[in-house]
Image (cartoon, helix red, strand yellow):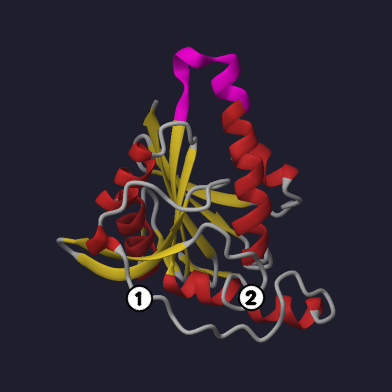
Amino acid sequence: MDRAARAAGITSPIVRTSRGDGAVLGFDAAVPKELITTRFVDRLLEGLREHNSSEPESAMRLRLSMHGGDVLAGPDRWAGDAIVLACDLVDSQLLRNVLAAAREASVAVLISEDWYDAVIAAGHAPDDGYRRVTVSEPKCRTTAWVRVPERSQPPGLEATDFAADKQPTRLRKPHDTEHAASARSILVHGTAFIGSHIHGDVVLGNKYTSQ
């Protein structure tokens, strides 16, 4: 993870907490969400491929979710609505089904509706391969967006998984750099550490599975 972050140009510290065979990562809020959504995921994919090629006996596949919000950082675990949603997304049966169906893929990504609106719908990253879905779990029912990198469509979805696409709300073209500074200001959530609360960090939940 750290190697992928450095390769993506993320130099600020990453805080983390373990989830058994997975982890939750907290990125500094000064790191734009689009950088995490694109370059970090790309570098992570490259790293997984390199690892799986050189050490096939310990090959890994990754379910990845992305959401942003404030969390309460305790000595052993984090808490808060943002953590709960990120974990619900990464543990969802829908994402498990997608990764299982994408047999040659190393990563499947599920991002929250808020994350999609802030990054994809706002035009800061391409929408290639994303499908809007309904995540329905015993304690969570929400809409989100799923993608398998380098695939035009995520596999393994049932007809009932799809949610109606939202009406386009783009205000600028993807990768429009004319207003890059102001665009980043929309995505920056100033991070401050006050006591045991982490304010405005970007939360990323993930889960490792064996190939």
Q: Residues within 10 Å of mark 1 (few under 14, many from 20)?
A: few
Query: Magenta part of the protein: which range?
Result: 50-60
Q: Quadrant of the C terminus?
A: top left
Residue 175 percent coordinates (x, y)? 75, 69
Viewer-nearest residue: 134 or 157: 157
Q: Quadrant of residue 169?
A: bottom right
Secondary structure at numbered mark 1: loop
Left or right: residue 128 versus residue 204 is right
Going by the numbered disc 1, the residue's amino acid type is Ala
Residue ID for mark 2: 187
Left or right: residue 66 versus residue 76 is right
Going by the numbered disc 2, the residue's amino acid type is Leu
Q: Residue furthest right?
A: 178
> Looking at the picture, does residue 170 appear above or below residue 36?
below
Q: Earlier in the sequence, mark 2 or mark 1?
A: 1
Viewer-nearest residue: 23 or 191: 23
Say whether residue 211 is magenta. Answer: no
Q: Are marks 2 and 1 in contact (CB under 8 Å)?
A: no
Q: Residue at x 24, y 69 (%)?
A: 141
Q: Residues within 10 Å of mark 2 (few under 14, many from 20)?
A: some
